[in-house]
Amino acid sequence: MQYKSPLLRSLQSNLRLQHLSRRTETAYVYWTKRFIRFSGLRHPSELGAAEVRQFALLFLYRNVVGRSLEELGRLPRGRVPTTLPVVLTPGEVARVLASLRGTHRLVGGLLYGSGLRVTECLMLRVKDVDLEQRELVVRRGKAGKDRVTVMPETLRGPLEAQLRRVKVLHDRDVTSGGGWVEIPGGLDAKYPAAGRSWPWQWVFPARRTYRDPESGHTRRHHLHESVIQRAMAEAVRGSGIGKRASWHTLRHSFATHLLQAGYDIRTVQELLGHRDVATTMIYTHVLNRGGRGVRSPADSLEPGGSGNGGLGCGG
């Protein structure tokens, strides 16, 4: 999409130079527009920190909290609470994956087996899958970084089958005059035919095609996250595990199970694509069950000993 405003065009160009996702680009543009309207259509160069704080706080309290700022007085700065991620046991992972079918099971297998984020998995392209080396290349992950992660040997066959299905679909699209996909940055100008080539195709394409208004090409987008959300919710319910698990829970479980297996935290950090090892450290808290891995002294009491005879619930 080409914006009429020079400011928004400049913002769009800078975001694309950083190879950020279209979802991120859309969010930045949306909130920039909201801020400009809030500020009386003044250019951001005329505004400063005070206007930004006012915009953020007024939006929060008027639209979310439903109270005015004036009645609150001086607000102290609070700490952001640390929330431990939900992690499944290997047995629970197996039960959830067994409740998924087809493409959904393959997506779930990659999230757990490779530590991918949902969007990273759905945005995989054919050229990013190395079946011989058993590697996946994640392009422009969070913070715009590329990384290489492991491909589970057990998913090699299902991935080969998926690529065969996609090849049939792509050949059919090309025959009907389509076969195009969106490619990042300015590569479409540098390599005009790349968007129709086999290596650039999505591993998980959407069912429907669309016509791009700028190029006129009939394109196929990758599978959208919203399409697969219901399948995971149903799989969790069907597995009977009793935890509020999501697709992202499989990534959390990947990291935790690697640490349990003895892999060092730096290796796990690289596989997950975390910029700071402190982010990965959250999984060490998950490992330290029972309060930093301490064994309670109550578990050392012998049944039938003097006093209360252990901690059994006697009469």
Image (cartoon, helix red, strand yellow):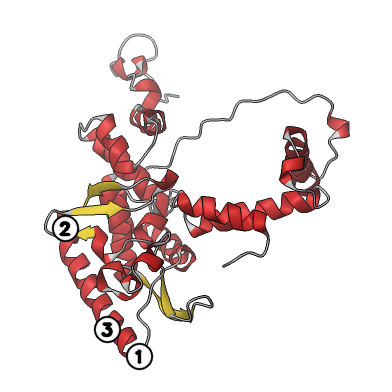
Residue at image point 67% right, 51% down: 32
Relative image position of residue 77 (x, y in whole percent): 68, 24
Which mark's residue is nearer the viewer, 3 or 2?
A: 3
Cβ–Cβ below 8 Å for labels 1 and 2?
Answer: no
The local secondary structure at tag 1 comes to: loop
Residue 171's disc number: 3
The local secondary structure at tag 3 comes to: helix
Residue at image point 41% right, 50% down: 248
Residue corresponding to mark 2: 154
Residue flagged by tag 1: what amino acid is it? Ser
Q: CA distance from mark 1 to mark 2?
A: 35 Å
Residue corresponding to mark 1: 176
In the displayed structure image, the side of residue 165 where residue 74 appears, left or right: right
Q: Dot 2: within a 10 Å radius of its alpha carbon, few (fewer than 14), some, or many (20 or more) residues?
A: few
Relative image position of residue 198 (x, y in whole percent): 26, 73
Q: CA distance from mark 3 to mark 2?
A: 28 Å
